[in-house]
Amino acid sequence: MTTARGPDGLGQEGMAKLLAVTRTLATAFELEALLTAVTDAATEVLQAERCSVWLYDASTDELVLSVARDIREVRVASRHGIVGACAQARAPVFVPDCYADPRFDPDVDRRSGFRTRCMLSLPLIDAAETLIGVMQVLNRHDGVFEAADLPLAEALAAQCALALSRARAVEAMAERERLMHELDLARAVQCATLPRALPDVDGYSLHASFLPAEQTGGDTYDVTATSQGLLLVLGDAAGHGLGAALSVTQMHAMLRMAWRLGADLETAFREVNDLLSDTLADSRFVTAFVGLLDTTTHRLRYLSGGQGPILHWRADIGEFVHHRANSFPMGAMPLPAARPAACIDLGPGDLLALVTDGVFEQPDAAGAMFGVGGAEQLLRNSPDETAAAIGARLLGALQTFSRGVAQDDDITVLLVKRQPMMTDARRLSSN
Amino acid sequence: MEIQVVELNSSVTGVRLAGRLDAPGADLIGIKFSAAVASPGRHAVVDLSGVSFLASMGIRLLISTARALHQKGARMVLFGAQGPVRSVLEEMAVDQIVPLVDTEQDALAQLSG
């Protein structure tokens, strides 16, 4: 039988085999294909009956048997058995007679039906000195593994570790790209629900801003003239990513359908709440303000499911009044009965500010939150300011406040300002 | 963020939360909190007196856990929330689905009522 052993360990024949293996490993990029290439190479080069590869899972501090014939995934603590001893010592472990070694765990043999006679375990350590896993070659064809096998085995293990490390990096990159694609999709779904333009409403100045976070926070808004009045919606789904975007889009679509079918505010709110409660997962719900403004009487009737505080700037007293949500977050559970709407009367020069928590919870570089107080300071306004000017001031200040800090939640601001009386100030140009 | 779990009696689990219940805080204790109150047939009372800040991800954790308990026929009651934490729960009307009372005694009374 031909062996790869040479007098100086890594002989000419061993070197040739190693080069062939290196070429093979260089062409495999997917982890699974690479693991197969690694085990094939090790069994051939080291004249072994079999080869297993355990990959180290740092998140659980376990070794995971990733390639072995006749057996599915096995996980062991990183200190368990011979494989654990090799991982801990980061050094080769020779075991000439496995069943005579107290560290040997015969469970894998029992499950695979293979009988391990002798074993050489080699740590797989990459160029950054990170433990990738452990390679075990089992049952040398012509005897047991010896020190003379070590140069070739270690050279092979080093090549394998580099290739596995590279494959893991490629997989991580692919996963990042997949996530980015999912986020792009989430953002597209979310943005498709937003109105393209705000309606012109006599006697009012309107403004809406939506700044999506990189992770997509699940905000939405709507401002639409309906037969029942000016519909105002501000929604924020719990969580981030595609799930949150789909939850809020679902809420938005249900509300629009309810309006199209002629439902009143209370019925629409209850029906949508109950449908969301039936269809959303336990961890999902949507905080949402749904209001109808009568632009003739200036009375706003609303139901707010967990969306609060609702900020009402009273021009007559020069103060903000906070209104609480009058129902729990939508979809959290069914409503036993329709809830009565609450009312806000908008006086001349009053401002209604609907703001998602992405504004209040935006931190600065030191970790301090922008807060409700911070928002209120910037929303205080003079009679002749338009909603657009007030919104620009708020967002500008928020940007300055959070300089150097990533925005990790969507930011949505909806401002409805009733124009002051003609005698109080010059008429505002509509937004 | 810290969490302590105690068995208050044969049918009620007590959970004491302390620290900032924001996104990192909720991440840190989320699994332990959900697991601690998930025993079938057991109610839960949650002490928020040590919580200094409550953000949307913390509220999400409280609501989703209360929902999961509700589906198993059990209830969750919050108590001890102070200042801004209490305001957030009230402003978002979370107290309409997860009762919010002052003391542990009130919470236990709510469960037996």
Image: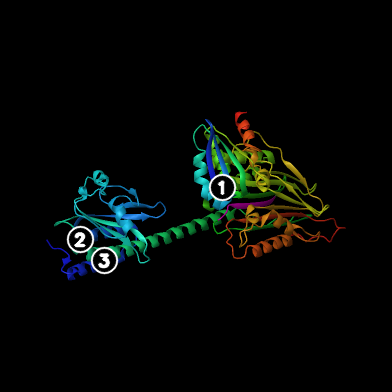
Asked where in the image residue A264 lies, by quadrant, the reply is top right
Label 2 vs label 3: CA separation?
11 Å
Q: Is residue A107 above or below residue A214?
A: above
Query: Which residue type does callout 1 highlight?
Result: Ser
Query: Which residue type does callout 3 highlight?
Result: Ala
Task: Please state which of residues A357 and A290 is positioned toward the viewer in this rendering.
Answer: A357
Task: Please state which of residues A188 and A84 is positioned toward the viewer in this rendering.
Answer: A84
Left/right of residue B91 with respect to residue B63 in the rendered view: right
Q: Position of residue A53 (x, y in %)?
A: 29, 55
Farthest-out residue, top: B113
Magenta-span inclusion, residue A219: yes
Q: State the mark number for residue A46.
A: 2
Label 1 vs label 2: CA separation?
56 Å
N-terminal-most mark, 1 or 2? 2
Q: Secondary structure beneath disc 1?
A: helix
Left/right of residue A75 with respect to residue A178 in the rendered view: left
Q: Is residue A232 above or below residue A167?
A: above
N-terminal-most mark, 2 or 3? 2
Magenta segment boundaries in residue numbering = A216-224
Q: Which residue is mark 3?
A: A155
Q: How many marks?
A: 3
Q: Is residue B83 above or below residue B71?
A: below
Q: Secondary structure beneath disc 3?
A: helix
Q: Which residue is mark 1?
A: A247
